[in-house]
Image (cartoon, rainbow, N blue to C red):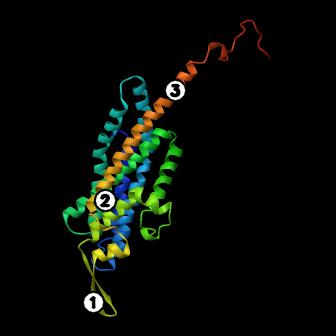
Amino acid sequence: MRRDLGYYWLRLAIYLALALGLGTLYYNVGSTYTSVEARSSMLMFVASFLTFMAIGGFPSFVEDMKVFERERLNGHYSTGAFVIANTLSSIPYLLLVSVIPGVVAYYLAGLRDGFDHFVYFTSVIFACMLVVESLMMTIASVVPNYLLGIIVGAGIQGFMMISGGFFRLPNDLPDPFWRYPLFYIGFHKYAFQGLFKNEFEGVRYAYNEAGVPKVMDGEYILRVKWQVEMGYSKWIDLLVLLGMVVVWRVLFCVFIMIAEKVKSGSMTLVSSIPEKQKVQVMVNPVATPSH
């Protein structure tokens, strides 16, 4: 991984540039009520588009799959060992890609004070990166073509993104497809709501209404403006994201085993065809070539 510039290092450079762009665009957004929209938009961009760019590593995922298939045919590698090794080896790089741009964007924008809030912010980014990588590895086990795999991955993430509760509020999502099940099975719901709780819960914003100073608390913003589910804490949202990582990795392992069985069955079927039924091309050594 460290030798492939496009695998993580180029992505780190792009994420860092985007983080600088976000940080300067939302530089020191302030702590008044008018900053709520700006904070929400920035958090949406982080949860959606920063993680969306993980599809750029798909060609490297396909190459990993090709190496695994060769090693598997030689009997040197089991499916479970490959899935576990692939997961563990990617974690340090994803932490790097999450923390460094996260520091730049978080503190330039002046998001909520407190180191614990920053840790949660980067933890959600890291979990989302893991989810997207697990999704793309699952796609790579089924779709070995670079372009087609990127299109499929982008399409799946696009559907999850627009049904995540930001572009269209949860109560306004149409049934049955967009709200049930897509809103609940997509990772953007839990990323958005976890980041919003981390930013607004327990905070009070001052504003003026007809010249009269008033105060609005963060819980009201979460419940009314963004229709966030307040029955559980932000840590549950993070745990759900990590649970999705496990689910996608298990699916990745299952799809690999299914693909192996399909290939094995195809080879067995071909080898079982009688010799008389196989097409043979005979070469006549005395034939004169046509001019």
Q: Residues within 10 Å of mark 2 (few under 14, many from 20)?
A: many
Q: In which quarter of the image is residue 98?
A: bottom left
In the image, what residue type sits under mark 3? Gly
Q: Hey, which residue is sitting farthest top in the picture?
A: 286
Of residues 290 and 183, which is closer to you in this image?
183
Of residues 283 and 81, which is closer to you in this image?
81
- Residue to which mark 1 is pinned: 213
CA gap between label 1 and label 3 equals 74 Å
How far across and how far down the image is residue 88, in percent? 29, 41
In the image, what residue type sits under mark 2? Asp
Q: Residues within 10 Å of mark 3 (few under 14, many from 20)?
A: few
Instruction: Name the side, left or right, on which 279 lies relative to 168.
Output: right
Which of the image's four quarters has the C terminus? top right
Judged by depth in the image, the label closer to the viewer, 1 or 3, is 3
Instruction: Name the side, left or right, on which 256 lies relative to 232.
Output: right
- Residue to which mark 3 is pinned: 265
Q: How crowded is mark 1: few (under 14 residues within 10 Å), some or many (20 or more)?
A: few
CA gap between label 3 and label 2 equals 42 Å
Q: Hey, which residue is sitting farthest left in the picture?
A: 115
How far across and how far down the image is residue 196, in percent? 32, 67
Secondary structure under tag 1 reads: strand
In the rendered structure, which disc, 3 or 2, sits on the residue that comes first in sequence? 2
Asked whether residue 209 appears in the rendered view, the answer is yes
- Residue to which mark 2 is pinned: 237
Secondary structure under tag 2 reads: helix
The residue at the point 42 percent across, 53 percent down is 53
Which of the image's four quarters has the N terminus? top left
In the rendered structure, which disc, 1 or 3, sits on the residue that comes first in sequence? 1
Instruction: Name the side, left or right, on which 78 lies relative to 161.
Output: left
In the rendered structure, which disc, 1 or 2, sits on the residue that comes first in sequence? 1
CA gap between label 1 and label 2 equals 34 Å
